[in-house]
Image: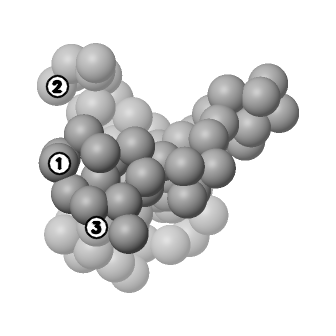
Amino acid sequence: MSTVREDLERFQHFVDERLARGNDDASLDELFDQWQDLQSRDEINAAIRRGLADVDAGRHQDAFEAMKAIRQELGFSSS
């Protein structure tokens, strides 16, 4: 889990890179929104990579079997 200081340093680095490329017309709020979007995308991509690694390693279950197990666990009919 990141600390506030680490997040601020990463945001500062992001802003510095944008400014160095001449992208200085965005507001602070816009830059922050862009940075958050990138953070979310990185987290999503990491989750996808973990999921694909699980599938490659055989750690998965057929969706129909999973739904059957959930119905049984909740006491619903299996029909």
Q: Earlier in the sequence, mark 3 or mark 2?
A: 2
- The reply, left or right, for residue 54 in relation to residue 40 is right
Relative image position of residue 54 (x, y in whole percent): 69, 31
- The reply, left or right, for residue 79 in relation to residue 65 is left
Is residue 4 at all visible to an observer of this figure? Answer: yes
**Residue name at image x 42 percent, y 55 percent:** 67
The answer for how far apart the CA atoms under marks 3 and 1 are is 44 Å
User: Is 12 rendered above or below residue 31?
Assistant: above
Coloring applied to the structure:
one colour
Residue type at mark 2?
A: Val
Rendered image: mark on residue 4: 2
Crowd tier of the residue under label 1, counting other residues whose Cα lies within 10 Å: few below 14, some 14–19, many 20 or above: few
Residue type at mark 1?
A: Gly
Q: Quadrant of residue 64?
A: bottom right
Judging by the rendered image, the residue that carries numbered circle 3 is 33
User: Is 14 rendered above or below residue 58?
Assistant: below
Relative image position of residue 48 (x, y in whole percent): 61, 47
